[in-house]
Amino acid sequence: MELIPIGEDALLVEVDDSDAALALALWARAHVKAREVVPAARSVLLDGVVEPAAVAARVFDRQADWATGAATSEGALVEIPTVYDGADLDDIAALWRCTVAEVVERHTAIEYRVAFCGFAPGFAYLSGLPAAWAVGRLAGPRTRVPAGSVALADTWCGVYPTASPGGWRLLGRTDAALWDVDREPPALLPPGARVTFVAR
Amino acid sequence: MTVTVLDAGLLTTVQDRGRHGCAHLGVPRAGALDAPAAALAGRLVGNPRDAALLETTLTGVALRADRAVTLAVTGADCEVRVDGRAVSFAEPVPVRAGAEVVVGPARRGVRSYVAFSGGIDVPPVLGSRSTDMLAGVGPAPLRAGDVLPLGSPTGSPAALDVAVPVRPGGPLRLWRGPRTDWLTPADWEVLTGSAYVVSPDSDRIGMRVLGPPLVRANRGELLSEGMVLGAVQVPPSGLPVVFLHDHPVTGGYPVVAVVDARDLWRCAQARPGEPVRFVLR
């Protein structure tokens, strides 16, 4: 773990992996007074904190508390009904050296966890795919990926909340409303949520 | 009780103090880029701190209120006319119902702030009325013909207050890091010793600068990490970008420094082509 002060009132905590980042973020949300707690792939930004040095000391001292938190705190389980007809389904099958039916079987068998959000409001990075199934991004991004597209990049799975350019490989699509500002929380998949995909 | 937009200019948006507590969901903070000027405009018309106002960009805006209101314009220095008659800048101005308000082009600076007593009362989205230009959260940028609701005035206009005049070229004080070590010591000298100028590509997301590129010492890849307001990011071009209020919540280019919060208003008011200096605080 590395604790890096940023400016006057922020702290970047570098940790080993996305599980540790999520665990720290969930703990910090309950135990640290911060304007923003932003987990990422291998770090957590604590922004708008009073006395960042004191916060850093607490994060360091209480590592035993937060490091075990993610395993025990069960987030809500969200089911994403998915039609598996994505444009890159055949490519993913080739990369995984299996049939399209097996891609669907494998993808629906995993329980994912929202590690963090980014890229666009409500765009969740779902962890859970084994490293052996990592797929590269497209050589050139598509200019428009439709809202609801279920896609893979590296070992991440994600669902586009709104139409946007994107370079992830498309598995399928869902009608689920990923982002709704009139809902609390507005993101269907906030950090910590558990997620499964159900073939339709 | 409404304000009608007659001419929205280059870009006019509704802003307040921004959206807080949603960065982990991918939502930028938004909010007035020149926060001190926006706060002053609100105080002048007697609004509470969270009331919304309008932020113009270079060319100004033309408006009509359907009831008598108090108006104040701050930030980028400009001519303000009510029914064709010039009125004071950075002072509360009573405006009759139906009068035409023309906020002229900025003479110095970029963004003027136009506050009405009662505030712009569009429905808040995630706790803020601000327009975010990156992710599209909040009201769309204004267009001619838009009709904006006004709230009820709650306080009294405050005549005596001090406007900070916009002067270009003031230094931007830097904090180090978190990725200062991605620059060579020579690069740090370049960053803090060079005359940069503001790029025309600057917007509410970031102030881009033109000048000597920085050669990153560490050319490895950085995993995306949380970004702060004022972050000085160095993309592969080597030309620094200062993140302003609509910045992405995470980013993968190294942040080699952070502009002191007290100097961010200077970035909001720096015009393309004007000089920028970075100094270690």
Image (cartoon, grey):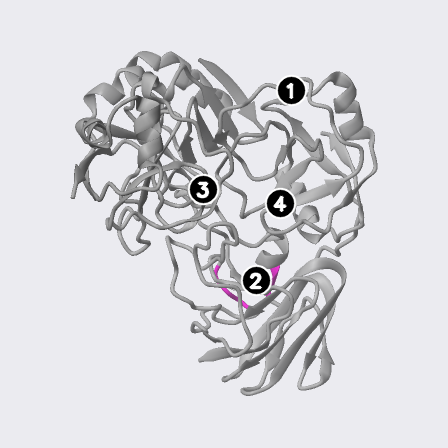
Circle 1 sits on which residue? Answer: B182
Mark 3, residues whose alpha carbon is within 10 Å: few (<14), some, or many (≥20)? some
Gap in angstroms between the C-alphas marked 2 and 1: 43 Å
Q: Which residues are magenta?
A: B40-48
Q: Is residue B153 left or right of residue B115?
A: left
Q: Contact, CB < 8 Å: mark 1 with mark 3?
A: no
Mark 2, residues whose alpha carbon is within 10 Å: few (<14), some, or many (≥20)? many
Question: Any mark on residue A166, and which?
Answer: 3
- Residue drawn at point x = 42 percent, y = 33 percent: A38
Question: What secondary structure is marked by label 3?
Answer: strand
On whether disc 2 and disc 3 are found on a single subunit, the reply is no
Gap in angstroms between the C-alphas marked 3 and 4: 22 Å
Circle 4 sits on which residue? Answer: B206
Circle 2 sits on which residue? Answer: B43
Membership of A194 in magenta stretch: no
Q: Is residue A29 left or right of residue B205?
A: left
Marked residue chain, label 1: B
Q: Earlier in the sequence, mark 4 or mark 2?
A: 2
Query: Residue A130's quadrant in the figure?
Result: top left
Q: Contact, CB < 8 Å: mark 2 with mark 3?
A: no
Q: Nearer the viewer, mark 2 or mark 3?
A: 3
Specify the amino acid type for callout 2: Arg
What is the x, y in percent for residue A58? Answer: 40, 18
Q: Nearer the viewer, mark 4 or mark 2?
A: 4
Gap in angstroms between the C-alphas marked 4 and 2: 27 Å
What is the x, y in percent for residue B263? Answer: 68, 42
Q: Nearer the viewer, mark 2 or mark 1?
A: 1
Specify the amino acid type for callout 1: Trp
